[in-house]
Amino acid sequence: MNNSELCAKELQYEMNLYGKRGVALARGEREFVWDVEGKRYIDCTTGVGVAILGHAHPALVSAVQKQSATLMSCYSPFANEGRARLLERLSALYGAPSKVFLCSSGTESVEAALKLARKKTGRKSFTSAMNAFHGRSSGALSVTFKEKYRAPFEPLLGPVTRTRFNDIESLKASVTNETAALILEPIQGEGGVRPAKAEYMKAARDICTDKGALLICDEVQSGSGRTGKFFAYEHFGIRPDIVCIAKGLGGGVPIGAIIASDEVSAFTPLEHGTTFGGNPLACAAANAVLDTIEKDGLLAKVSSDGAYMMQKLSASLSAKQQFREIRGMGLFLAIELKVPSREPLAKLAQAGVLALPAGEQVVRLLPPYIISRESLDSVASTLSGVII
Ligand SMILES: Cc1ncc(COP(=O)(O)O)c(C=O)c1O
């Protein structure tokens, strides 16, 4: 079947949730993917920031092959060497005495964080930011901003107060002695790739401490090295009480986690849990991803490639009529246009570059960390050819 036949077949049988972009992917290698008609693309979507080592990375392939031939299922009451190693490493990455809960997706990690905040504080309410996206299960959806996503499913968890992002006065008014937790993305992803200001994150930390509320950083998209530090909050010199990660952690194998300081890790047995969380296959994938990030110095590469790309994109795009602004940190990049991004995204795909929207007028780039300078140059020049 060709691209359009496969898209049509999926649209026929899949619930009407995603739409299709006219491309059916068959395989990938490094930063490239090929569609079923043999066309090659540079992949700046990475399955929404998932395939951070690119596609078919030998270390990840070998870890998954080996683990799948050894042991794939091991429910958490039974220990497993790969899981023990991953738990220890995630706790060490947090950098303070902490406990980890493993799950299988971003929304599940947010769900766990919200439950833990209620359990620890005995309080009910949450504060989240305008334009925040935290996932689509009921708890995570409650703290997500877009009314369109929430309205059909009310009543959700509450009360939730919405605070203006990057506005300290608004934070002071929103976080009270009744707030269980403030949840923030250090870089709003779906909300348009908007980095928090350092003073804002520092104020968030202080206000939460002052009010006895927990600070949750949702690093589902910004974590696992995407900004050049393992957690984006490290750029701001703070540490949240709970951090949520998922997406890139397994390099393509579903895995999510929360890491919480020992002090707030208040769950008692069976208060929370999940069948798939911490399965040996996902843990082997995550260990291979962490090994490769360390061994190949990928955090430093993400930082320097990000700076290179920012400079390259502003040089080639700033004089364009449709161009408004470039934002981002590391390889978490966005170009805001003065026009809807739908058509430029389609033209980019035609020209061999896959990118994502992030709101109406934003082109979002989430390339794999292993991308070559040659491919980054090619992405920049293709963008320059497509944006008028
Ligand atoms: C910041 C953030 N939190 C949570 C989620 C939800 O993650 P998942 O789609 O894995 O449930 C996403 C997904 O885009 C996200 O960007």
Image: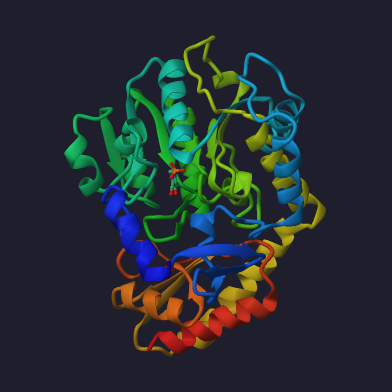
Residue 318 left/right relative to 251 = left
Q: The N terminus is located in which quarter?
A: bottom left
Q: Compared to 272, does 250 lie above or below?
A: below
Q: Compared to 265, does 72 lie above or below?
A: below
Q: Nearer the viewer, residue 73 or 332?
A: 73
Provide residue 253's location: percent of width, then percent of height.
59, 44
Which residue does the image show at 29% across and 41% down from the upper left?
A: 162
Which residue does the image show at 69% across and 64% down from the upper left?
A: 370
Does the image show residue 47? yes
Which residue does the image show at 51% across and 79% down from the upper left?
A: 352
Provide residue 329's location: percent of width, then percent of height.
56, 62
Q: Compared to 289, does 345 lie above or below?
A: below
Q: Compared to 320, does 273 lie above or below?
A: above
Does the image show residue 231? no
Q: The C terminus is located in which quarter?
A: bottom left
Q: Nearer the viewer, residue 95 or 157?
A: 157
Which residue does the image show at 44% across and 16% down from the upper left?
A: 119
Q: Residue furthest front?
A: 1
Q: Residue furthest right?
A: 295
Provide residue 343's location: percent of width, then percent of height.
32, 77
Quarter, ligand 1: top left
Residue 19 left/right relative to 243 = left
Q: Nearer the viewer, residue 254 or 296?
A: 254
Residue 147 left/right relative to 305 = left
